[in-house]
Image (cartoon, rainbow, N blue to C red):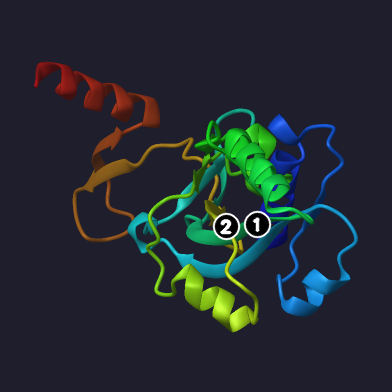
Amino acid sequence: MIHEVDQVLRNMLTGGALEGSGIEISFDAPTRDWAARRNGPVINSYLYDIREDVKRRQRGHVDIRDDRDVVVKRRQPPRWFRLSYLVTAWTKRPEDEHRLISAVLATLIPRELIHPDELPPSLRRLGLTVALSVAGIQTEARSLAEIWSALGGELKPSLDVVITAPFPAYPEYDAGPPVTEGASVRVRAGLEEDAPVLEERAHRPAQIAQAKAARGNRA
């Protein structure tokens, strides 16, 4: 899932205000060695933190339906994870870096939500919208200054981009076939298996559904 979110972010950064610019998009750690090796302008999106959004954790199961709206499989609900990226611009002049950062802001600010159609297949089939925030209040345990210190580099202007994406739960398991026959109740004259049947009542699924609907209307 993580590499697919990387691709979603790459697609967004190469579009919008940066479309046609040819700016390289990198996901490498922006260390001193990496900075010394680069040859041209780069937008760096370093994934520095991964943690679950426990407020969105769900219990139970999710139904998977076929074209006839029949439940054919079930799976656990997806778990949601906050992927935090340190986005920086690298050029020879600070003014150019500021222009690139402004272009990144202009590209990402309107994208608070990412529609399922823009996601890769494994995430798209969940039918869930993915949230994106940019330059928000720092809420992680480590500050950006501490991250720069750990990378061994000098502090640069950066954007904290957080994408909260679902991680599909596996495996899926088959669901039982839909009920097509109702239960029946037989009243016999005795406990013996061959005792004569005094009364028999059958309840079909359609009749049960109609009875529930009637009770609901009366309420």
- Residue 8 visible in the snapshot: no
Assess whether mark 2 and mark 1 are in contact (beta carbons under 8 angstroms). yes
Seen as rendered, the residue at the extreme left is 219
Image position of 87 with respect to 66: above or below: below
Could you tell me the amino acid type at mark 2?
A: Pro
Residue 32: where, in percent of width, then height?
74, 77
Q: Judging from the image, what secondary structure is the residue with disc 1 in?
A: strand
Q: Position of residue 170 (x, y in %)?
A: 60, 63
Q: Residues within 10 Å of mark 2 (few under 14, many from 20)?
A: few
Q: Nearer the viewer, mark 1 or mark 2?
A: 2
Q: Answer left or right for 216 relative to 161.
A: left
Q: Quadrant of the N terminus?
A: bottom right
Q: At 83% across and 45% down in the image, what residue appears? A: 23
Q: Is residue 203 above or below residue 51?
A: above
Q: Residue at x 52, y 36 (%)?
A: 113
Does any portion of residue 28 appear in the rendered image? yes
The quadrant of the image that shows the C terminus is: top left
Label 1, on which residue? 88
Q: Quadrant of residue 31?
A: bottom right
Q: Amino acid at mark 1?
A: Thr
Residue 153 badge? none
Which of the 4 quarters of the picture holds residue 26? bottom right
> Residue 206 at x, y = what percent?
38, 25
Q: Is residue 136 above or below residue 21?
A: below
Q: Which residue is the site of mark 2?
A: 157
Name of the residue lying farthest toward the right: 39
Q: For the residue labelled by badge 2, is the local secondary structure a helix, a strand or a loop?
A: loop
Q: Is residue 92 left or right of residue 199?
A: right
